[in-house]
Structure formats: structure tokens, C-alpha cells
Amino acid sequence: MECFYMNWCLICLTAAMVVVTSGGKMKIVEEPNTFGLNNQFVAQSSRLQAKVSPSPVSGPQHLHRLAGRCYNYIEAIYKYVFCPFHNITQHEQSFRWNAYSGILGIWHEWEIQNNTFTGMWMREGDSCGNKNRQTKVLLVCGSSNKLASVSEPQTCVYSLTFQTPLVCHSHSLLVYPVLSEKLQKEWDDIEQARYEELVTEQGYNKQLRDVFEEAGLLRRAQQHKPEESTTSLTHLNLEQCTQDFEQQRAEIERLRSLLTQHNISYETTAESGQDQRKPAPLLVQDQHDHGDTGFIADLL
């Protein structure tokens, strides 16, 4: 009984010393419960805070069963937790007072190349200098679902390899079968236009991305609101209309003078009551020497 009492006193004394040396409040490092974020048993100030919400679950239907699960991987003193279609977190397992515990990425979108899903991108993780941490997850064939390896090929850009039997079939990561009939038809039309050289390579890639965005495989780029024009399209009164007319007429005279100065002639013919102006051929040297004259004749 006496030994028990002495041991209990020692435990109490040690706990008191810890509280005193830590300034009264000890920081709780969150473990990756509830997908590594927003653990309800941890104080709000100590939880990992995501910058954005995960994108909706998308891609091959047979991979959707991975949603809601998490897979651990330990390397050295770090524990990585990958929760497909949700997030990736990293936890330093040490006794340092400032041991790192953070988010390496939130589920964002697929990487697609040549009609194949080549990776899952987890973006908008914790801040890292002037950018945010992000992770690419490679899906490879394996006998069981497990996180196989983690690396950091670039600073704050991570690469994870996830093994799963769900991608062992040769067609398991094809993009075309995932699309609706409507989007498959659109893709067929885009490929036909490319074959007939009716669209540039840049236009082809843009149209294809539009299809993938509509399917929810890629996150839509944020559209910037166009700046409102400060020029009024209507005239408030006759005086303003007259002023605008005089300004336009002065600009036309200036352009005519510029054409004459560079020996560029134009003819005016009347046909069906319309005034048509036919520009003379523009010499190559004029295009190079006077960059603003190439389109002037068209305006007149």
C-alpha cells in the first residue's frame, strides 16, 4: 500500500511539472480520425483546417467504393494518411513540442492523358512558402488496397503510390466509358474535327477539357468577371451624340492622312446606295515598318 501511494505521488508530481513547464496549456496534435480533419474530440483551435472542400467523387464507378476509407503509411518518423476522394495528411510522430501535423492536399481533380486516368491530384494543402502543398496519387495494380510509397520530387509537391486490385484490368482506367452518351458524342465530334484539320491542336485540347469539366473529372477554372466598359453604348442627349460623331469623323480623317502618308491608296465606289471602300494591296515592307497600318485600310 505504501509503495502504491509513493508511485501515485510521483505520477502527480510529474504531471504538475509538465503543466508548469508547458505554460499551463498543452497543444493537442490531432490524429487522423474522421478523414484526418475536423476531429470532434479535439479543440477547434487544434484541428487541421482545410482551405477548400473536396471535389465530388468522380471517375470510374468501381473506384467509388474507396470513398470513405483511409489508408496509412509510415516512413521514418512520418505517418501519412490517404483518404481517397477526400484528403492526404502527414503527421510527425515525435516528442518535439512543434511536431508537424498538416494537410498535403484536398481531393481536386483527375489527371488525364490519352484517354486514361493517370493520377489523382490533391491540391490546396497547407501553405508552403508562397504556394500550397499538393500531392499526385498514382494508382497501380496490387493484391490489396494499400499506400505503398511516398516521395517529394519537388519542394512541397508530393507523390504517392496507391496499390489496389481495382485497377488491374487493362480497361479499368479508361476515360471514354465513364462519360455519358451525350459527352461521348461530343468527344467523337471533336476527334472528327481534329482528323479533318478543322480545329487547331490548341482548340482540340480546349474542347476536350470542356468535355472533362462537364463530366466532373476536372475542376472548372474560376471565371474572372469581365471588367465593365466605361464607354456608354447610348447617348444621353443630342449634344453628346454630336460630340461623338465629330470625334469619329476626326479619327477617320487622321487615318486617311496616315494612309496617304505611306502611299496606301483606296477607292470609293457606290453600289446599291452603299459606300464601299476597297483597300489597295499592302506591301510587305509596309507591314513590317508600320505596324499600325495593316488594319487601317480594313477600317476604312
Image (cartoon, grey):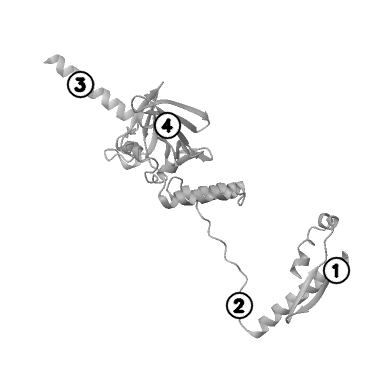
Number of residues whose C-alpha sits closer than 10 Å to that of mark 3, classed few (under 14), some (14–19) or many (20 or more): few
The label shown at residue 9 is 3
**Furthest-top residue in view?**
3
Mark 3 in CB contact with mark 1 (< 8 angstroms): no
Tag 1 secondary structure:
loop
Residue labelled with disc 4? 170
Front disc: 2 or 4: 4
Circle 1: residue type: Ser
Q: Earlier in the sequence, mark 4 or mark 1?
A: 4
The amino acid at mark 4 is Ser
* The image quarter in which residue 293 lies: bottom right
Name the spot of residue 251 as percent of width and height, x first: 76, 72
* Left/right of residue 154 with respect to residue 21 in the rendered view: right
Mark 2 sits on what residue?
234
User: Which of label 4 and label 1 is nearer to you?
Assistant: 4
Closest to the camera, between mark 3 and mark 2, is 2
Q: Residues within 10 Å of mark 4 (few under 14, many from 20)?
A: few
Marks 2 and 1, Cα distance to the nearest angstrom?
A: 34 Å
